[in-house]
Amino acid sequence: MPKANLLTIEGVNIIKKHTKPNKENDKGGIVEQEAPLMNHKVALLDPKKKGAITKVKFKTNKDGKKVRVTAKSQTELTGAKK
């Protein structure tokens, strides 16, 4: 599985890892972690149509720059939110 195709999304794909006691962690236990997902399992949500999954198209804007646009509502997409 190539690492380039993996995404980690906050609050999604939570796994439980069982740990043994060691020097750093006196008590063992069950730790919840976020595991990476393959990028083909992630979809883009349309910002105008709440919860609607959409594809991305490319268009040129008035300045002649190539921008990403949602296919359903033609909303221009900016960078990712963090």
Image (tube, rainbow, N blue to C red):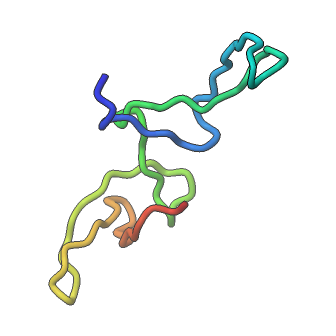
Q: Nearer the viewer, residue 19 or 52?
A: 19
Residue drawn at point x = 83 percent, y = 19 percent: 26
Q: Residue at x 31, y 59 (%)?
A: 71
The relative height of residue 67 versus residue 54 in the rendered view (above or below) is below
Outermost residue toward the front? 23
Q: Is residue 35 above or below residue 46?
A: above
**Image location (x, y in percent) of residue 46:** 46, 58
Residue 25, image x and y in percent? 78, 22
- Quarter of the N terminus within the rendering: top left
Residue 43 vs 20, above or below: the answer is below
Rendered location of residue 40, percent (x, y)? 34, 34
Q: Residue 45, percent across and down?
A: 47, 53
User: Residue at 21% across / 65% down in the picture?
Assistant: 58
Quadrant location of the C terminus in the rendered image: bottom right
Picture layout, residue 62 above or below residue 70: below
Q: Please give left or right for residue 36 compared with residue 11 in the image.
A: left
Quarter occupied by residue 27: top right
Q: Residue furthest left?
A: 64
Instruction: Depth check: give the residue in front, 35 or 53.
Output: 35
